[in-house]
Image: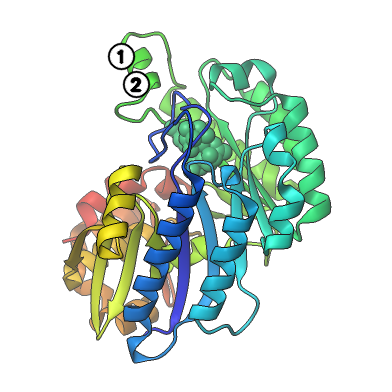
Amino acid sequence: MPSSLALYIHWPFCLAKCPYCDFNSHVREEIDQERFASALTQELQHEAERLNADGKRILTSIFFGGGTPSLMLPPTVATLIEQACQLFALKDTPEITLEANPTSVERHKFREFRQAGINRISLGVQSLREEALRALGRQHSVTQAREALELARELFPRLSFDLIYARPDQSIRDWQNELREALTLAADHLSLYQLTIEPGTAFEALHRQGKITLPSDDLAAELYHLTEEEAASFGLYSYEVSNYARPGCESRHNLAYWHYENYLGIGPGAHSRLTLKGQHYATRRHRAPEPWAKLVETKGVGTKEETLLSRQEQTREMLLMGLRLKEGISLTRFAQKIGRPLADYMDQEILQACLDEQYLLLEEDHLCTTLEGRLRLELILARLVL
Ligand SMILES: C[S@@+](CC[C@H](N)C(=O)[O-])C[C@H]1O[C@@H](n2cnc3c(N)ncnc32)[C@H](O)[C@@H]1O
Ligand code: SF4
């Protein structure tokens, strides 16, 4: 019976829709803050009751994600934190992260977010170059991003920020300079994502029309290698495909996903993976904000779908998540969770080929990817798992 729990809270609204983004985010002229705050607390209460039926779970982290959760009212954040800490058991102080955008409106709320209990902030900086911010459709400037970073460093014990690289026309030298500037800003954690073209986004249409070109695979791989080297020279090691941290400053919340621990997601479109009475379930909430709120108001919970996962499905998910981590997957932990050895679920010929090509490594108790393997992870997993 797993007792730990990571809690994800989704705020589905943004000031504007960024042209590259396919997250569950929506723009509204006016947001009914009270309605959404109340639906979130109601859904949390509902889910906690069934989760705690066999004893209180231990809450290890809370993550306010989005959308743009820094558009929430600080008292809503405070209420949700207080409620979660009462509903679940606490061992150590949970890691409580808020994703924030660095516009000046949001920066002015940072102090109140800190008072509400946020102890880690993750800023969506995206770039330290003005023209890139414009091209990415961002609502903030480089100066605002720097101001937000400075204040965040003062107020919050832990700070991370996001950058998007491998952008159209970005040379190795350009990225090296930008990344070095970012690394001097003294965050303990960075999320560095290569730009991807997501279905249904404005960038996808531009890409199709040939108006946006991404770096070639070779250039993207070179940029990735460079990123790892530069981050390491500033003491941030790459612990996951796109995440870099000082040792001990890894995102505890995201590690719960990658370690395939139990997590509860509340809010529109949020996902959960929960073990209830020895069975493992995948739960997904209604994606559209207003229908989700309506569902919560009538049924107490906005669940769209809940499915029981077979051991095969759990294996696939565990590999997909675990192999993103540099440390890889512990064979012992896998066998404890699934009840059978990992080898039972893998095509042995493909596994051997991946080991020969040095995409995968078997090191004592761990199966892990090399840098080359991580660049091809999705392709490898599609063939490897039976
Ligand atoms: C939930 S999103 C955004 C959080 C926050 N609203 C913001 O915009 O900063 C988390 C991160 O995913 C990254 N991201 C989103 N879409 C992406 C894409 N198509 N390619 C690369 N990174 C992307 C961005 O760095 C973003 O900060
Ligand atoms: S990147 Fe962030 S701000 Fe932009 S649309 Fe997506 S969630 Fe909203």
Q: Dots 1 and 2: beta carbons under 8 Å?
A: yes
Residue farthest along the bottom direction in this orientation: 55
The residue beneath circle 2 is: 204
Q: How crowded is mark 2: few (under 14 residues within 10 Å), some or many (20 or more)?
A: some
* Label 1 beta carbon less than 8 Å to ligand 1: no
Q: Is residue 194 visible?
A: no
- Name the image colouring: rainbow
Instruction: Give the distance between the C-alpha atoms of the residues marked 1 and 2, in whole angstroms.
Output: 6 Å
Give whichever of 256, 105 is nearer the camera: 105
Q: Is 233 placed above or below 314 here?
A: above
Q: Is 340 placed above or below 106 here?
A: below
Residue located 67% across and 39% down the image: 106
Badge 2 element: helix
Q: Is residue 129 left or right of residue 267?
A: right
The residue beneath circle 1 is: 208
Q: Quadrant of residue 165?
A: top right
Measured as percent of width and height from the top left, residue 174 is found at 67, 22
Measured as percent of width and height from the top left, residue 283 is found at 27, 62
Q: Which amino acid does label 2 sit on?
A: Glu
Q: Quadrant of residue 136?
A: top right
Q: What residue type is labelled 1?
A: Arg
Measured as percent of width and height from the top left, residue 218 is found at 45, 28
